[in-house]
Image (tube, rainbow, N blue to C red):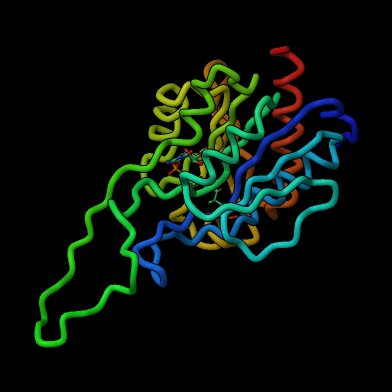
């Protein structure tokens, strides 16, 4: 891992989950801890980049020399990512909620005391942050997505690579124990449009982040 690989580059990374409010005390979210994205931000800063890290609600310290912007919802995460443009590289490691409640109740929702009836929440689609940035007038020169999948991992990941107009996708099999959401380790496969899929075997998220940043920096140089 060479220091200075990304000197002079602005790298935008998003990380962690988003929270979508149901009412003032409840929300929809997922198990992302932010560890993968924070490790990437740390590695990019070590490689010499100026790094903006847009973080959902996580319990992690900010890596050295990283500019951190904290957000809660997908809408806020999109706004913060757009506000950080222009960037040379965008890495979307966040687990953005695909849906949010159609409205946030102004007060705490009460349960019907005399009834066993369930409660139906209406959900609406959230914006796709990665697809928005990859189609943006100020599109980062190199856009990297993650694909968290439980089956046909490489198939669905390749589909996201083309559908979201990406330069590289990191396929993450989140059905395997000990890797993926909230784990300290990960194992991924890198897929782009030309080369054969490149597996990065199980390692700590810190080690994998350095490997990923080295691969991406190499592609950035050859595509520049
Ligand atoms: O945070 P950790 O605990 O360390 O876990 C890491 C991780 C498993 C969350 C990470 O490695 C990972 O796989 N992140 C992507 C999770 C995800 O939401 O994948 P997806 O297949 O649903 O989305 C595909 C891509 O589109 C992702 O880059 C995602 O950031 C992006 N997306 C998805 C939906 C949406 N509304 N907006 C987006 O930008």
Quadrant in which the N terminus is drawn = top right
Residue, x 82% and y 41% (percent of image)? Answer: 45
**Does the image show residue 218?**
yes
Quadrant housing residue 5: top right
Q: Is residue 34 left or right of residue 45?
A: left
Q: Is residue 4 left or right of residue 70?
A: right
Residue 10: percent from left, percent from top: 76, 30
Residue, x 65% and y 61% (percent of image)? Answer: 184
Residue, x 61% and y 62% (percent of image)? Answer: 58
Give the farthest residue toward the right.
3
Residue 26, compared with residue 12, is above or below; it is below
Residue 206, compared with residue 5, is above or below; it is below
Residue 86: percent from left, percent from top: 68, 25
> Which residue is nearer to you in this view: 125 or 34?
125
Quadrant in which the C terminus is drawn = top right
Picture mark count = 0
Residue 213, compared with residue 41, is above or below; it is above
**Does the image show residue 202?**
no
Residue 156: percent from left, percent from top: 39, 35
> Which residue is nearer to you in this view: 54 or 92?
54
Residue, x 69% and y 51% (percent of image)? Answer: 38
Give the farthest residue toward the bottom.
114
Residue 91: percent from left, percent from top: 62, 36
Quadrant housing residue 198: top right
């Amino acid at each position: 891992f060479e220091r200075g690989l990304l000197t002079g580059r602005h790298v935008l990374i998003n990380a962690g989950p988003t929270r979508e409010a149901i009412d003032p005390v409840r929300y929809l979210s997922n198990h992302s801890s932010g560890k993968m994205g924070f490790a990437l931000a740390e590695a990019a800063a070590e490689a010499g980049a100026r790094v903006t890290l847009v973080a959902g609600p996580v319990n992690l310290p900010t890596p050295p020399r990283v500019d951190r912007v904290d957000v809660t919802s997908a809408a806020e995460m999109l706004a913060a990512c757009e506000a950080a443009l222009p960037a040379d590289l965008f890495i979307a490691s966040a687990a953005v909620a695909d849906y949010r409640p159609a409205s946030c109740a102004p007060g705490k929702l009460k349960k019907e005391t005399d009834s066993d009836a369930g409660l139906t929440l209406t959900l609406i689609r959230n914006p796709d942050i990665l697809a928005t940035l990859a189609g943006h007038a100020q599109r980062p020169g190199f856009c990297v997505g993650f694909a968290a999948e439980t089956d046909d991992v490489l198939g669905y990941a390749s589909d996201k690579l083309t559908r979201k107009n990406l330069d590289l996708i990191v396929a993450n099999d989140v059905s395997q124990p000990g890797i993926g959401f909230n784990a300290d380790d990960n194992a991924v496969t890198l897929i782009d449009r030309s080369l054969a899929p490149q597996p990065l075997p199980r390692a700590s998220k810190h080690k994998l982040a350095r490997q990923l940043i080295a691969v991406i920096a190499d592609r950035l140089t050859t595509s520049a």
